[in-house]
Image (cartoon, rainbow, N blue to C red):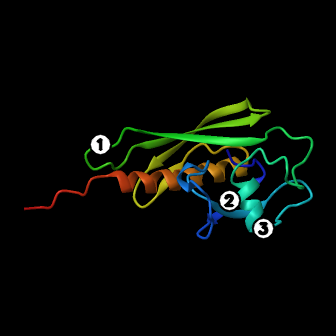
Amino acid sequence: MACPYFMPVARLEDGSFLHEARLPLGWGWNGRCTAPGHDETVPTQNELQEFCNLGYAKGCSRLPQERAWDSVRFGARTVGGNEKTRSGGRVQIRYVCERDHLPAEHGTIEFELSEPGQRCDQRHPDSRVQRMAECFLAAYMEKRKRREPPSELAS
């Protein structure tokens, strides 16, 4: 679950997360805070690790008292495409925005996979949730590539 006010920008290469693969967005991210009155604030390394990438950041001084969500979580599944080559198809990113550990909003953001990237026909109205979904998709696709068996050599 990531903080709903976190706008991820780039993969955090120098984070020291205990279990990075279990992070809500697939791995750690650098980014900026979009909390009211703190737009464009760049969080410290400690804030990225303790609050931004994890959600439920009640210890963060920028978290507004009045807010719709405390965190956002994601899951993914691949639909269609060529199973042998694992090309084409779509990835459905399911999201749940939580408040006080309960669902407050949920839905699916679907990405059409094509070379060289992906296309999203219906974006989430909140640009932060959309960007988090894109980041989650990048991590999901990278992990999926690592799990794929090597392609057969032509004889």
Q: Residue furthest bottom?
A: 14
SS category of the residue bearing label 3: loop
Residue at image position (62%, 64%) is 16
Secondary structure of the residue carrying numbered label 2: strand
Asked if residue 92 lies left or right of residue 8, the reply is: left
Q: Is 92 above or below relative to 149?
A: above
Q: Amino acid at mark 1?
A: Glu
Q: Are marks 3 and 1 in contact (CB under 8 Å)?
A: no
Mark 2–mark 1 distance (CA, rounded to whole Å): 31 Å
Three-letter code for the amino acid on which mark 3 is drawn = Thr
Relative placement, left or right, of 26 versus 52 is left
Which residue, given by chain and number where applicable, does mark 3 sit on?
44
The quadrant the C terminus occupies is bottom left
Can you give x and y, in whole percent of width and height, for residue 7 in the image? 72, 57
**Mark positioned earlier in the residue sequence (2 or 3):** 2
Q: What separation in Å lies between label 2 and label 3 (alpha carbons)?
A: 13 Å
